[in-house]
Image (cartoon, rainbow, N blue to C red):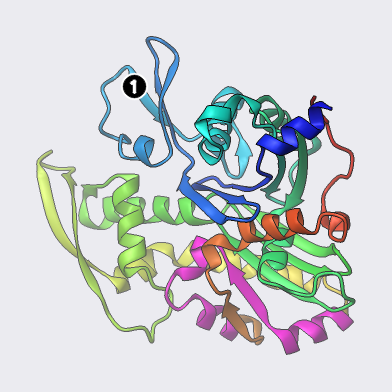
Amino acid sequence: MFNRLFRFFSKDIGIDLGTANTLVYVQGDGVVINEPSVVAINQKTNQVVAVGNEARRMVGRTPAHIVAVRPLVEGVISDFEVTEEMMKYFIRKVHNVRYGFLARPRVVIGIPSATTEVERRAVRDAAVNAGAREVYLVEEPMAAAVGIRMPVQEPVGNMVVDIGGGTTDIAVISLGGIVASRNIKIAGDKLNEDIITFTRDEFKMLIGERTAEDIKMAIGSVWDGDEEMETTMRGRDLITGLPREVLISSTDMREAISRSIKLIISSIKATVEDTPPELVADIMHRGIVLVGGGALIRGLPNIIERETRMPVRIADDPLTAVVRGTGIILEDLDILRNVLLEHENDVVV
């Protein structure tokens, strides 16, 4: 009885629970939320002040008692209570405020591959405590492959590289399962750190994480043949302590992030080495597909193609590939059940 009532007032949702951004897919409506995975907390009252876009605007601009935190680090939950509050916020935002207390949706959540059983349990518990009726987990590269309509259940090799905020997930998929994979803690956040370090060492200037992210998006490049671009960078001079403005180029960006990009490519090569020869032949024909925000760095397909000698392409709308995959799984749960990490579910009534 209660299940029927909850189904009436609830919209089933898919969530890409990312280190940098959380995206939410609503059955029948598509992707409705794409907000930063940031929560602002008042430490005096221990109350959540803001979540998502509003909280991100507070980063680096809050008084001492208000702290903007990212509850997910390298793709896994680092602060359980804050993650739970963030998920509650997104679930309630999807549903009508009037009936929000009756919202108990089925939820499919994309998480990084190579997570431990404890980490998976933390995600499931956070979702249940946030109001989910049933929780299903799927590995992000699998969800991305489903989202970009790869034939994941057929006996052919599909290779996906998901470069997110905290992790890069590399997987070869066939017959509804992951045959070979790598998960490394080098992705968008690490590239931002590289840019901050490069700026400090080369320009003797300190910049923040948001500034590094903006510069990466504006002129980030890894391919020497790309058009040269420049942008203005503002920060604090480490010698005088005063504000300073300098011009930074895409050549500087290539130098700053080159080591991390080489490590990502090495992991792609290692995954190919672990793949059965028949599937490698399929990948040589079908190509490697890049998804995630990191896929948008200029020249990345070119350099991966040169190093692996395989065709490489960026998926259409790579930022939403994972969450679109969770949505497709929701729509055809019975058919795609075998791609999920686990089949048993906590049912809350």
Q: Secondary structure at mark 1?
A: strand
Query: Residue, x 72% and y 66% (percent of image)?
Result: 146
Nearer to us in this view, 147 or 66: 147
Q: Is residue 232 shown in magenta? A: no
In the picture, measured across the screen, residue 48 lies left or right of residue 77, that is left
Residue 112 at x, y percent in the picture:
68, 50
Residue 9, compared with residue 335, is above or below; it is: above
Q: Quickly name the residue at label 1.
A: 66
Query: Residue, x 75% and y 57% (percent of image)?
Result: 331
Three-letter amino acid code at disc 1? Answer: Ile
Q: Quadrant of the N terminus?
A: top right
Instruction: State the predominant SS element of the stretch in magenta.
Output: helix
Q: Is residue 300 shown in magenta? A: yes
Query: Residue, x 65% and y 43% (percent of image)?
Result: 11
Q: Is residue 150 visible?
A: yes
Residue 283 at x, y percent in the picture:
75, 82
Nearer to us in this view, 246 or 22: 22
In the picture, measured across the screen, residue 349 lies left or right of residue 278, that is left
Q: Quadrant of residue 281?
A: bottom right
As drawn, the residue found furthest toward the top would be 45
Q: Residues within 10 Å of mark 1 (few under 14, many from 20)?
A: many
Query: Residue, x 38% and y 42% (percent of image)?
Result: 53
Q: Quadrant of residue 158?
A: bottom right
Q: Which residues are magenta?
A: 278-306
In the picture, measured across the screen, residue 294 lies left or right of residue 122, that is left
Q: Quadrant of the C terminus?
A: top right
